[in-house]
């Protein structure tokens, strides 16, 4: 577990795989020969994604609700969704000082939709950000669904929460008229530039009203697409065409396809089909129902470009070539842990009451 989850620095360290590629001098890491063209110019550390919550709807034993921290270069970051206790997850992953550092360095927080498991941790995070930044610091930019604005404003009546708000709908071209204040639009432009991005563009998806996914493109050419909560849809496929990485929700296993359709979510098979149709280089599945507290059932051999997210997993885009290699060992670790958990429960039930 220490090897996969990163004992030193928290990164998922590449396993030694025979024939994987030539060793890069000085680093002792394997440089894959089958890397994607979009990664040709990427430097290690240019884009580091940390999964802080990979459960759907509510926490489970091993997974918290949705949140991802994307570190972009030195001293800049963005949060994609911010479910309840995201701040706690940052502290568990990076330590108290490391979490505070990343909160200070946030240039924006992006929220996909109005379900609470995607924004319930935002308010405490904004409060801490204000405390850390001090008086006179520019407020943090929040980009999200329009109905989030009155919720933030209501919180602001009770607790000081300095923020600027930009609706996803404006970035989608769905707000006629003058749109957001000039200061908000300028803050977004400055944040995208500071993050080293060519674009940060929401994608309208099929879930509840105002739901979006997001597409990030780096200056060196890499592209990361996150579906948010969604049914499989053409807009995600088009946005993820030939992308470096697609992060797609997989709330249900394939035998629950009717539930997925009714609740406007995706199955593992749906997510993998979207990845195949978009011709993405790598796909990571996330947002699992609490029915699956460890790992969903997927055919790893049939999907060699797939990985499964777990809380605290940290992935440098430069390491995408070998990322799928961790899926089978991770499943084995979860299986062993679950077996021990079940044995503990049996022993507890059988123990005499004293």
Image (spheres, helix red, strand yellow):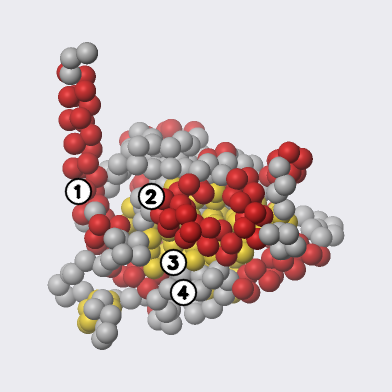
Mark 4 touches mark 1? (CB < 8 Å): no
* Image-based side of 121 in relation to 299, left or right: right
Q: Of all residues shown, which one is farthest toward the right?
A: 178
Numbered mark located on residue 48 in the image: 3
Query: What is the x, y in percent for residue 185?
Result: 75, 65
**Which quarter of the image is occupied by the C terminus?**
top left
Give the Cα separation between the discs numbered 3 and 1: 25 Å
For label 1, the residue is 332
For residue 278, which quarter of the picture?
Answer: bottom left
Secondary structure found at label 3:
strand
* Image-based side of 256 in relation to 157, left or right: left
Give the Cα separation between the discs numbered 3 and 2: 14 Å
**Residue that appears at 64% across and 49% down:** 127
**Residue that appears at 34% across and 70% down:** 319
Q: Is residue 346 visible?
A: yes
Give the Cα separation between the discs numbered 1 and 2: 16 Å
Give the Cα separation between the discs numbered 4 and 1: 31 Å
For label 4, the residue is 46
């Amino acid at each position: 577990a220490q090897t996969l989850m990163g004992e030193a620095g928290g990164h998922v360290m590449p396993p030694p795989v025979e024939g994987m590629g030539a060793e890069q001098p000085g680093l002792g890491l394997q440089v894959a020969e089958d890397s994607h063209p979009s990664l040709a110019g990427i430097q290690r550390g240019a884009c580091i994604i940390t999964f802080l919550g990979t459960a759907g709807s509510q926490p489970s034993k091993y997974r918290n609700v949705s949140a991802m921290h994307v570190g972009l270069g030195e001293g800049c970051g963005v949060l994609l969704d911010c479910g309840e206790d995201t701040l706690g997850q940052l502290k568990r992953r990076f330590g108290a000082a490391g979490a505070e550092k990343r909160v200070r360095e946030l240039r924006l927080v992006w929220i996909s939709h109005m379900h609470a498991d995607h924004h319930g941790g935002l308010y405490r995070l904004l409060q801490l950000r204000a405390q850390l930044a001090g008086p006179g610091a520019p407020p943090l930019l929040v980009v999200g669904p329009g109905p989030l604005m009155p919720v933030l404003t209501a919180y602001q009546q009770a607790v000081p929460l300095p923020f600027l708000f930009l609706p996803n709908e404006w970035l989608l071209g769905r707000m006629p008229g003058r749109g957001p204040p000039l200061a908000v639009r300028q803050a977004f432009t400055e944040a995208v530039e500071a993050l080293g991005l060519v674009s940060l563009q929401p994608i309208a998806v099929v879930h509840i009203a105002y739901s979006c996914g997001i597409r990030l493109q780096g200056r060196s050419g890499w592209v990361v697409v996150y579906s948010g909560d969604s049914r499989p849809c053409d807009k995600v496929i088009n946005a993820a065409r030939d992308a470096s990485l697609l992060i797609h929700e997989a709330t249900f296993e394939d035998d629950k396809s009717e539930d997925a359709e009714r609740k406007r979510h995706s199955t593992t098979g749906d997510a993998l089909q979207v990845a195949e149709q978009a011709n993405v280089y790598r796909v990571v599945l996330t947002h699992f129902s609490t029915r699956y507290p460890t790992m969903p059932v997927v055919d790893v051999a049939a999907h060699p470009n797939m990985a499964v997210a777990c809380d605290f997993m940290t992935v440098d885009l430069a390491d995408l070539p070998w990322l799928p290699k961790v899926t089978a060992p991770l499943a084995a670790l979860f299986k062993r842990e679950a077996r021990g958990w079940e044995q503990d429960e049996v022993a507890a039930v059988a123990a005499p009451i004293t």
